[in-house]
Each structure stands twice: as C-alpha cells, then as structure tokens.
Amino acid sequence: MKFKKSLFAGILAAASASALLASQSAVAQNAWPTKSISLIVPFAAGGPTDSVARLISVPMGQALGQTVVVENVPGAGGTIASTKVARAAPDGYTIYLHHMGMATAQALYDKLPYDPLTSFEYIGQVADVPMVLLGKKSLPANNFKELEAYIKANGSKVTMANAGPGAVSQLCGLLFQSRLGVRLTNVPYKGTGPALTDLLGGQVDLLCDQTTQTIPYIKDGGVKAYGTTTLKRLPAIPNVPTLDEQGFKGFEVKVWHGMYTPKGVPKPILDKLNAALKKSLNSPDVKKRLEDANIDIVSVNKISENGLKTHLDAEINKWGPIIRKANIPD
Ligand code: MLT
C-alpha cells in the first residue's frame, strides 16, 4: 500500500513536471524571438546569395521584431554551411538561405554529413535567378561563336571561375564545358562575389554568374555577356541571346533559393518564420530590387514547407542524372 502510494506520488510528480516543461516550452515558443536571429549564407559576402539574403533580412527582421543578422559561412560549394546548419540548435535562432546547391550537392559529393531531405525544416522557396555566361572585357571574342573558336584554339589556357563543387557557377561552367567537349582551367573561389571582382579586374577569363549583381556591368561593358542560361531572353538585357538559341539547345540553369532551419524547430516558430518570409518577399522595395535584376519572385504557394520540399525533391531527381551524364566532377 505504501509502495502504491509512493508510486502514485511519483507518477503525479513526473506528470506535473512534464506539464510544466510543456507549458514552459509553449511560453518560449510564443515569446520567440527574444534575441537576434542568425541567417546563414553559404557563400562569400558581396555575392548573389549574400545579396538576396541581405535584401530579405531587413523586412524579415521588421516582421519578427528582432534583427536578422547575415552570417557568411563560405566553402566547399555551400556544404560547410549546410553541415553547420544541420548541426545547429533547433531553437529558431539559426535560419539558412541556400540555392539549388542543396539539390545538386548529393550528386557532386561522395558523402555528405547531412541529408537535404531529412536534416532540415523547410520554410519556403524564395526566388528564381537566371544566369549569364560572362567573359572579361579584354577577351578577343565578341560573341558566342567567337568564344567557341577562341576556346577551341586555347583549350586549358582559358580560365573559368566558380564557387566550388555544389555552387551553381561550377555546375553551369562544367555543363558548358561538357557541351563544348573541352576542359578549361577551373578556378574555385569562396563565392561569385570575389570571382566577379577578379573577372572585372581581368585576372580570370570566364564566369557563369547569376544576374543579381551582373546586369549593371553587362550594360556598361565592364564584362562581356555571351549568353543567358534561360530559354527566353531577359528583359533587362534583351540584346544578350540565350545559349539555347545559339546552338546549346535546352541549356537552362535557373537558380532557385530556399529557406531552411535545423530539423526539430517547433511548428509555431516555423509558422512565424514563414509569415515573415512571405511579408518580406511582398514588400514593394524587395519586389522592385528583385525585378530589376530579372529575379522571379516565386508564387505564394511555393513559399511554404510543401512548396520547397516538393521542389527540392524534384530537383534532386532532375540534376542527379544530368550531373552524372556530364561527368561532373571529373
Ligand atoms: C554566391 O553567392 O557566391 C553564388 O551563389 C555561388 C554559386 O553558387 O555560384
């Protein structure tokens, strides 16, 4: 009887302790965020991913009532940052903006310390960014045909910048080389921000980069633009033909972005992050700046857990065979 009584008291104490914990955690989730939030970017500052992150971080912070601080964790084409985020505390204070490298990394690396489809929570898709094949302004080739001839004549003397395996600049550059049947000297950077600086300075010959920062340089002749990776010409640079129309049929690389958190962040926090992301992407300033760079804002149903996860899954299945067929990396 005595034993039964103490067992009952024990069960009661455990139940009230877990009820207390649950209510404390509900209070914490309601109060979140009570401090600044770190938005991890997997490439160097000054590049396209960093720019999109900085653009949306301000209105997101305003919507959440706390500052969203961008933290650049560059290296290994984004996989260092993805690993860091997968291992971070699931408390809502670490969020992550990555592009389609989240889908291509599995086919590019033998082993990843995270699984793109199970190691994260999925806040929503963010924006789709086109790419352009760029050359330094002193390159003698003035159009795509001349570039092909120049590359055939100079082979591996031609240098092409990228942001490492897992970066879209590398994917685009190697798909281009695979179509041409040549292998250039590929030069890795920590992001296409520093790569673009070197292209402008003439230290590297070619770079396949997103339009986020490149349009003003294309317009003022700071770089040569040989073709877009879209199937239609871009309104901001209508004189630049697509690679598709210049003989690279079906050559299309559109860089989609997604926002993630570590696995296990409570649903009420994910919902707040999703609402803040939607609000940010709908702010007139963000819309205008994305449109000026020919960046497509995704439809509202894609700014959701399901929208991002379905797309990620489809992109993993899409890019795996393309990457293997193109023999990337060699
Ligand atoms: C960057 O932000 O530096 C780029 O998105 C890197 C890349 O994937 O090419």
Image: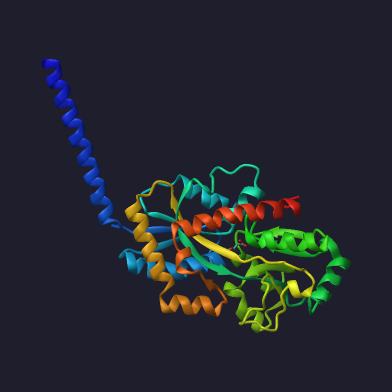
Query: In the depicted view, which residue is nearer to us: 314 or 52?
Result: 314
> Residue at the location (72% across, 78% down)?
241
Place of residue 72 in the rendered image (x, y in percent of width and height, measured from the top left): 50, 59
Q: Residue 198, relative to residue 111: is it above or below? A: below
* Structure colour scheme: rainbow
Q: Is residue 63 visible?
A: yes
Q: Quadrant of ligand 1?
A: bottom right
Instruction: Say above or below: 266 vs 128.
Output: above
Does residue 78 appear anywhere in the picture? no
Q: Quadrant of residue 296?
A: bottom right
The image shows a total of numbered marks equal to 0
Spot occupied by residue 229 in the image (x, y as percentages of width and height):
68, 70
- The answer to which quarter of the image holds residue 207 is bottom right
Above/below status of 236 relative to 35: below
Q: Depth check: 165 or 75 in front? A: 165
Query: Percent position (x, y) of residue 31?
Result: 25, 56
Give left or right: position of 145 versus 238: right
Residue sitting at 35 percent across and 64 percent down? 67
Q: Write the residue at 72% across / 66% down.
A: 251
Q: Residue furthest right?
A: 153
The quadrant in which residue 237 appears is bottom right
Residue 305 on image: x %, y % = 44, 56
